[in-house]
Amino acid sequence: MEIFNSLLPELIRIVVCAVCGAVIVFGNALVMGYAERKLAGRIMLRPGPMEVGFHGLYQLVVDGLKLMGKQLVIPVNADKPLYMLAPLLAFAPVFVPLLVLPFSEKIQGFDLDIGMLVILAFASINVLAILIGGWSSNNKYSLFGAIRSVAQNVAYEIPMLISLLAIVFMTNTFSLKEIAAAQSPVWFVVIQPLAFLIYIVAMVAETNRAPFDLPEAESELTAGFHTEYSGMSFSLFVLGEYANMFIVCSVATVFFLGGSSGIPLPFFEYTGIVWFLMKVYLLMFFLVWIRWTYPRTRFDQLMNFCWKYLIPFSLVNLLITVVMVKLV
Amino acid sequence: MKSYFSELFRGAWSLILGLKVTIKAMFSPIVTCQYPREKLEITPNYRGHIDLVKFADTGTHKCISCGSCMRECPSDCIVVEGEKREGVKGKVCVVFNLDFTKCSLCGACVEVCPTKTLDYSNDYELAGYERANFHFDLLKRVEERE
């Protein structure tokens, strides 16, 4: 009983965090799915979804219902347990990074000392899910998509980590809350513009979005790793992708754009979340914008850009940062 | 080494220019036609299926049931029948059917028509549920037209 009483607040906290995480994941997918299609339409000089509800507002709800109603087709020669596991593996880990993100000074699931490592560790499980999905589908397109995804993510994780490491050297902590708090006078985007640029590029590649969407490259590989997936197992991949977008944009916000800092509102310890979400969705808008602007890169261009430009630049940036930290 | 940096900056500049193009497009007006709710004005030169012309002076068509179109038609999709009536000079057209399922829109019938009473219609919304929807009774159509 004694143990139970001491555990109860913690248990409630866990439940509340889990529910909030689910709300963020699904709400974000709805908002981003709609915004992406609307913006894509506007960029192509057409109106986007218009039929269901006012200006097509309910389009995503209807699409979700349709996907839920669809049959889950499993190819005859697929590796069935792995095939079923892959979408879950793509979707489930996205909840964990949401727990450690500091939405405002007081709104945060858990302030871990190793918050940054937790986020990066769980974000990279997505690659494993794509590899398993592509491999177990027993389809050449899926396999090619999966192989590309692994090569791409392994390559782009390096500049991403190194650019974030420069910030860690400056703040001397892995805790996201302290990193966000360390930018009270100037945001790190001003001090570390190169790291920010490198992070943005690596972030696009990490979330497998255009112009780096080689794993699903619909014009070459039909749908890449999720060619064989239908119904809910397909939409779990999509939900995971949008949640990953949210997470990488949140990390960019925390590391470079000052987290929840902004013009003070009443009860700022809580209402800082307004600024936080505004910055996150501004970055997401940028991701959508570049998706509908640039053509897909060729695979050798993608790898060249990472190994010849991003990694050397991020290493030089890290070196300069370390020297400056030591001197100042 | 020089080309390494110049390539980088040239590439980055082209990326920025690309973003400028799309952001401009984002705020320009929509150019697509929202079809069921708005329809484009069809050009008078549009060559749809054939139709009988309604002449202003007689208030109806001028078909004399000569059958030239029927004989000229390479797809055999026109049926014209006329009958003699008392007090009327020439034949009166009583049947003018077009089987649009076979029509190849060649226009030979329009060219051969001696009274210029055949012309192309502007009707382009030709969707139907069954084959019979495309067997047009052109006499009925010319009467229904205002």
Image: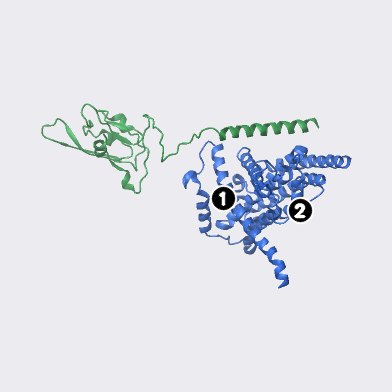
Chain colours: A blue, B green
Q: Going from the N terminus, do you reach mark 2 or mark 1 first?
A: 1
Considering the numbered disc 1 on the image, is that residue within a helix, a strand or a loop? helix
Residue labelled with disc 2 = A117
The residue under the point 58% across, 62% down is: A76
The dot on residue A213 is none
The dot on residue A30 is 1
Judged left or right of residue B137, residue A323 is right
Q: Residue furthest bottom?
A: A1
Task: Tell which subunit mark 2 falls on.
Answer: A
Question: How far apart are the alpha carbons under marks 2 and 1?
Answer: 28 Å
Respond whether the residues carrying marks 2 and 1 are from the same subunit: yes
In x, y percent, where is residue A308? 77, 40
Considering the numbered disc 2 on the image, is that residue within a helix, a strand or a loop? helix
Q: Is residue A137 visible?
A: no
Q: Nearer the viewer, residue A57 or A239?
A: A57
In x, y percent, where is residue A44? 55, 37
Q: Nearer the viewer, residue B100 or A155?
A: A155
Q: Residues within 10 Å of mark 1 (few under 14, many from 20)?
A: many
Q: Amino acid at mark 1?
A: Leu
